[in-house]
Image (cartoon, rainbow, N blue to C red):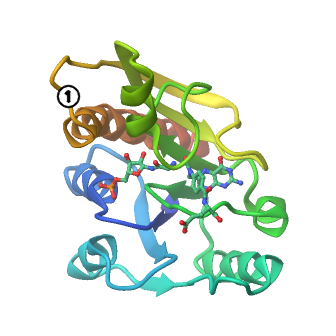
Amino acid sequence: MTFRLVVLVSGSGTLLQSLLDAIADGGVPAEVVAVGADRDGIEGLARAERAGIPTFVHAYAKGSDRTDWDAGLTELVDAHRPDLVVSAGFMKLVGEQFLARFGGRMINTHPALLPAFPGMHGPRDALAYGVKITGATVFLVDAGVDTGRILAQEAVPVLDDDTVDTLHERIKVAERRLLIDTVTEFARAHRPGQN
Ligand SMILES: Nc1nc2c(c(=O)[nH]1)N[C@@H](CN(C=O)c1ccc(C(=O)N[C@@H](CCC(=O)O)C(=O)O)cc1)CN2
Ligand SMILES: NCC(=O)N[C@@H]1O[C@H](COP(=O)([O-])[O-])[C@@H](O)[C@H]1O
């Protein structure tokens, strides 16, 4: 039985791509059955379309009811019957309804060594603080902002001449490794004796 992944993205989707490549290479016993986004016109969705993977967009209109948005996202994701939801650069917080359905089986990758530098700007905040070591974290999503149980972490050095972009790119190399390893572990645990 296939281990079904729904991946949520908001941007360029390089983490999604690394997962797709690892699956295609036979390194991850899972399938991406859908890719969802909170905005249209992003490279993350184009990557999914090129790979022939169904996509959906569920945008949040500023000022509208966030609970309704969360319920809509829950149904859109649930329609694809995921075993695991992967937030790979998804820039929206999921709420109560989403977590009632997918709590314990939604992971997120974050570009900092949590609990340091949570939120939307991990690399920028680490650079501004002046730390010499930052990193990547994969964790189980809960109701807080980047407070869920940590599953894997990797340290990444900050270099003297780093910009936010050069630092973020170095962190993404670590994030890709952690994400592939974590998804593989989930998929293996789901199919005991078959891997
Ligand atoms: N309930 C949770 N949802 C999500 C988490 C989480 O830890 N708990 N992690 C994220 C990803 N994330 C960082 O890792 C993150 C994403 C978004 C935000 C945020 O403050 N978003 C705002 C505005 C976003 C926008 O500009 O569109 C919002 O959602 O209103 C913080 C951290 C995945 N979801
Ligand atoms: N707080 C969430 C957050 O900062 N997410 C980050 O967005 C990037 C997405 O890259 P990608 O679009 O190239 O895959 C990744 O670094 C991911 O950790």
Residue 114 vertical position relative to residue 9 in the rendered view, above or below: above
From this viewpoint, which residue is outermost toward the front? 128
The total number of labels drawn is: 1
Q: Residue at left 25%, top 49%?
A: 22
Quadrant hosting residue 78:
bottom right
Residue type, mark 1 in image: Asp
Q: Is residue 1 visible?
A: no
User: Percent from the top left, x then y, of residue 68?
Assistant: 79, 84
Locate the C terminus and report the quarter of the image it occupies: top left
Q: Residue at left 44%, top 73%?
A: 35
Q: Ligand 1 is in which quadrant of the figure?
A: bottom right
Ligand 2 near label 1 (Cβ, under 8 Å)? no
User: Percent from the top left, x then y, of residue 76?
Assistant: 63, 83
Q: Residue at left 25%, top 33%?
A: 167
Q: Which residue is mark 1?
A: 162
From this viewpoint, which residue is outermost toward the top? 132
User: Percent from the top left, x then y, of residue 54?
Assistant: 40, 84
Residue 99 vertical position relative to residue 175 in the rendered view, above or below: below
User: Percent from the top left, x then y, of residue 160?
Assistant: 19, 17
Q: Is residue 34 visible?
A: yes
Q: Is residue 166 left or right of residue 146?
A: left
Q: Is residue 189 left or right of residue 169?
A: right
How busy is the neighbourhood of tag 1: few (under 14 within 10 Å), some, or many (20 plus)?
A: few
Q: Nearer the viewer, residue 65 or 140?
A: 65
Q: Nearer the viewer, residue 180 or 136?
A: 136
Quadrant hosting residue 95:
bottom right
Q: Residue at left 34%, top 12%?
A: 132
Which element carries disc 1, helix, strand or loop?
A: loop
From this viewpoint, which residue is outermost toward the left? 161
Residue 72 vertical position relative to residue 107 in the rendered view, above or below: below
Q: Is residue 136 left or right of residue 149?
A: left
